[in-house]
Amino acid sequence: MDNQNAKKSTKKLLTLTLVMLLVLVTIISMTACSIFTDAVKSVFNGEKAETKTDKDGNSSSASLVVESPSEEGEDEDPGIISTDPVVDVGESEVVTIAAESLVYDKASEEDMQISATHEGKDYYGVIGMGLISDGSNRRVVVTARTRGSSTIVIDGEYLCTLPADNYYIYYCVSDTSGRIYYEPFRLEVVNSVAEPTDLKISYDIDCPNTYVCFRCDCGGAHRVSFDGVNFDAVKGATRTRINTAVDKALSHTAVVTCLSSSRSAEVTKTAPTAEAIDGKYLLEEKSYSYKGHKADAYIEDDAEAADLLEYLAYQGAVTSMKAYVSETIHQAINENASGYLSSIQSAISVPWSLQFGCSYSNVSRVVTFKIEGTNAGATISSGYTDTRSYEKLSVTSHYTPAETVDRSRELAINGKTGVGVRNVKELLAVVEAGYRPIAEDETLALYNKAKDFCYTYLSAEMSDVEKLHVIYDYLAGEIDYDYSALNLFNLIATISQTELVDGEYVYVLSLDEAKDAIVNALAAAELETDPSKKFSSAMVDAINAAMDSVNAPQTTDDLVAALKVDYLQRLSAFSVEGVFDDGAAVCEGISYAFMLLARIEGIECYQITGVASQGNSRVAHAWNKVHLDGKWYCIDATWGNTFFNDTKYVTHRYFMVDDGTFSVDHIETINDSEAAVANLAIGNVEYYKSVDTSAGHTLYVRNNADVEAAVAYFHAAGSHYVEVMVDPSYKPTSGTFGNAYMKAAGTTKYSITSSTTGNVFIAYIE
């Protein structure tokens, strides 16, 4: 009995501890991904120091406020005093690569040695394309390290996994003050023994046409022979269209020859059965169109099965389609239908939960694939509103509504290939792939809202950088960060904690304990005066309904599913509806909106996912990369603002900068491996250097005169907000800016609240 009482006491203590932890996490996290409204409550890994000083620079009082925002487990705002070194942005030209050749031939399979000199500086590390990361899995090893020079060895086995291409890598060094310098260099990976692989004769790229598809690591041109007739595949192409009549009832053979290595490979497509031909499963009349391609209803392999099921899943409703399958797939379904469907489901990307099914015969290879359950219905608004103000400064904001909205302007996306879409998530996938969405009903209405933004705020006379600047400033300034979504995310994370018991992971909290934790969290949030730390009334109703519905949850798992699957995953905050319908979203919705608007204007842009770091903690986050003039740039509109005195201001610390700068607090994720970079960003528009504050001065400050000009520039516009980038060789203090303010305002005292991330300094002075 004492044992049982002890266990109960332990559980109660654990519940109380978790509740307190939730409250603490919620308080700390509230300033997270600071997307539109609260976007980046403390966008700078720095301190907020408030000091009152007289004209002689003597401090009369001081207080230090450290803000530590974190996202909905989704993103995290830097906000704590940073221990990261200052970053010198751009090509510093402090590193000289001494390797005889920066070309690696995969045929050698040997490690690659690179030597470098960097006068007065120490080797720090390398980051780059693919999965290169200093010391990770021994991919990069330092064999010699002295001040002024170093030698690194890149693992040959790793290099052989990279496709033949040109790769940029940052070679990083640091000086005695801890500043990091990112010097990009190009590494060319070639393969002199490349051989065509993954050959396939495909009827599914543009039914009823026929293509020969292949992969080859040479990056060059190929010759394709189809039933003895030759066709050319130009350099870099991975497929070629057979522009002669193809009888799909017959067998066909294709041979692909690499013109660089003279190596060849062959594939034969056997004739389909009479059942497939008679049922017309290879013909256009039974095909389906999805994301820019038209596929037939003859499913020959797992990749085609996954494509069909993903197509069905994006309909967002219970639906089905009859198809003819290969003998291998038919056998797998006969042996274990649910197991086969599960394996296919794991290979597709659908941002909601669903359930697959199928009906089939032991004899016929005709299978009806079904979507039997889905939570892809209409999105739900969290009902979040933020009462805090946003101050749009004429000296920093770059968007203004056009006096006359001209909807006759030809948008770049109108020239893209049209693809039918059935919901917003499919629209986003199609647009990001470079197509023009053809939508109806609610999806069309949402798309039109995005286009209306472009008509209203953008023009044909703007450069691409100017258009991106407008989009960034609007999203960072006008859109609120949906903290209700963040609050619920944190709450679910708290009650979802598991522990390993007898080899199985079980929930730490029982159903009753999880409900108690929710009730206590709601009560604690209700006492908050800061709106960002509250749950919206609509969300409170939804949470209570999940706990007390007619179909009341029987287990903690049921409760988590009711909150997460049936509610959280449907919130508009995680998609563009949050931006265009509610005016509030989290990082996922903001980065999707940025991608959509950029793509409408013809700018290549992708949503990037990874983690954001704050000290030793990391949380999931999303941002963007754009491709302009042959260079990639990083953008994070969610972290594009900061708060002073409950008023939001847009900052440009995360606008069009390089991966060297972003790597301080953004870690891109590829294939579930951290420190990966899909397209290494080496471009930097250097916003601060582009803003002239007065003759000979910009927002990039190198001396006291630059600071005085910058402070006077903001003061003349009626603003107490100041945003500058500080040259690494210049060491101003808060007092430097305070003295500049006293001079500009003609006063003898000032109060300053400031924040620093890297070499970007922002402050509120009055």
Image: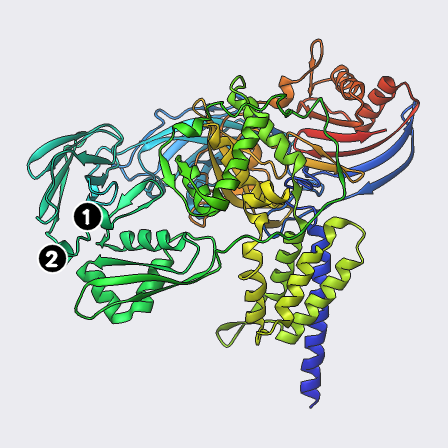
- Who is closer to the viewer here, 703 or 737? 737
Residue, far left: 228
Eyeballing the image, is 31 above or below 244?
Answer: below
Q: Distance of mark 1 from mark 2, alpha carbons?
A: 14 Å
Amino acid type, label 2:
Thr
Foreground of the two, 512 or 49: 512
What mark, if any, has residue 253 been given in the picture? none
Label 1 sits on what residue type? Leu
Q: Is residue 368 left or right of residue 242?
A: right
Quadrant assignment, res 9: bottom right
Check disc 2 and report the residue beneath it. 273
Q: Which residue is mark 1?
A: 283
Count of numbered circles on the image? 2
Query: Residue at horizontal 53%, vertical 17%?
Result: 461
Considering only vertical position in the picture, is 629 above or below 695? Answer: below
708 displayed left or right of 298: right
Q: Earlier in the sequence, mark 1 or mark 2?
A: 2
Please tell me which residue lies in front, 717 or 377.
377
Which quadrant of the figure contains the C terminus?
A: top right
The location of residue 25, given as percent across then percent down, is 69, 56
